[in-house]
């Protein structure tokens, strides 16, 4: 038996998704056509969403996503971090290197979870909250590579492997990085990787990083 649902809530959520998919906003008429409802219904939906700061309308009357969604978005990182920790712990212990989960934050890569190995004499210090441009470091370049899968192109001077990215000395002198993108997770754009002090990343690290990325993706689906 189909669960009973709220048609109004469903329409409101559809409005938010439509607005999130456009950079220039949508008019009431455009929303009316896309939703298949009359303009009066759209006006009511927008007025309600505006009260919660989830939608704003510019001087031209075009509706856009409001700043209120940022408050909801802040709650995503702890949930993603919790889901990723088992795979990160296993990766860090297996490789003997610092493992991390990195998510996109604007034009930057943001480390939201970090696990250091327990058995090594030394390893790279890395902390949650560390940011760097997407164009630098394995974590960011793996994400950019995933964006370009339809038309693969070299990203900077990264060395592209079969589904993972390797870099050397881009964020810290003497440190190598390996990362693989999270794939097939709606609403989450990121990568899983390791950073280590080495001249060359061992061959098995790329494959192991890909496995961890798949494990995290599965946990988030």
Image (tube, rainbow, N blue to C red):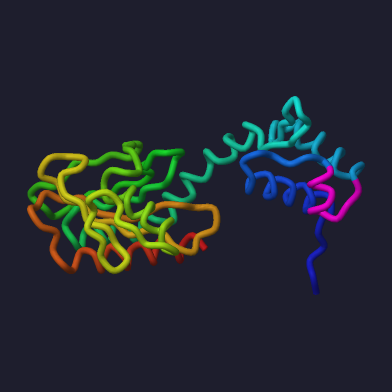
Q: Is residue 210 above or below residue 9?
A: below
Residue 89: image x %, image y %?
29, 57
Q: Position of residue 22 (x, y in %)?
A: 64, 45
- In the rendered image, residue 33 lying in the magenta stretch gets the answer yes
| Horizontal side of residue 74 vs 111, given as left or right | right
The answer to whether 139 appears left or right of 14 in the picture is: left
Task: Establish if 210 lies above or below 19.
Answer: below
Q: Which residues are magenta?
A: 29-38
Give the percent coordinates (x, y) of residue 132: 32, 38
Question: Is 14 left or right of 151, judged from the image as shown?
Answer: right
Chief secondary structure of the magenta portion? helix
Q: Residue at x 34, y 61 (%)?
A: 87
Residue closer to the observer: 174 or 155: 155
**Residue found at the very far bottom of the displayed protein:** 1
State the image coordinates of residue 175 (x, y, percent, origin top left).
Answer: 14, 46
Identify which residue is drawn at 66% across, 38% down: 65
Point 22% across, 51% down: residue: 157
């Amino acid at each position: 038996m189909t669960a009973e649902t709220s048609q109004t809530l469903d329409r409101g959520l559809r409005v938010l998704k439509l607005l999130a998919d456009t950079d220039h906003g949508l008019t009431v008429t455009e929303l009316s056509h896309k939703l298949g409802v009359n303009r009066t219904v759209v006006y009511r939906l927008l007025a309600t969403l505006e009260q919660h700061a989830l939608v704003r309308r510019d001087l031209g009357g075009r509706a856009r996503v409001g700043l209120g969604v940022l408050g909801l978005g802040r709650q995503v990182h702890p949930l993603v971090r919790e889901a990723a920790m088992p795979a990160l712990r296993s990766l860090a212990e297996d490789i003997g290197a610092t493992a991390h989960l990195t998510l996109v934050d604007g034009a930057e890569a943001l480390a939201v979870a970090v696990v250091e190995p327990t058995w090594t004499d030394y390893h790279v210090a890395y902390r949650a909250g560390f940011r760097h441009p997407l164009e630098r470091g394995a974590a960011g370049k793996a994400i950019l590579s995933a964006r370009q899968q339809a038309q693969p192109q070299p990203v900077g001077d990264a060395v592209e492997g079969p589904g993972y990215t390797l870099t050397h000395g881009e964020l810290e002198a003497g440190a190598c990085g390996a990362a693989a993108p999270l794939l097939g997770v709606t609403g989450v754009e990121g990568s899983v990787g390791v950073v280590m002090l080495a001249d060359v990343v061992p061959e098995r690290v790329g494959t192991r990083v890909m496995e961890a990325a798949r494990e995290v993706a599965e946990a988030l689906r």
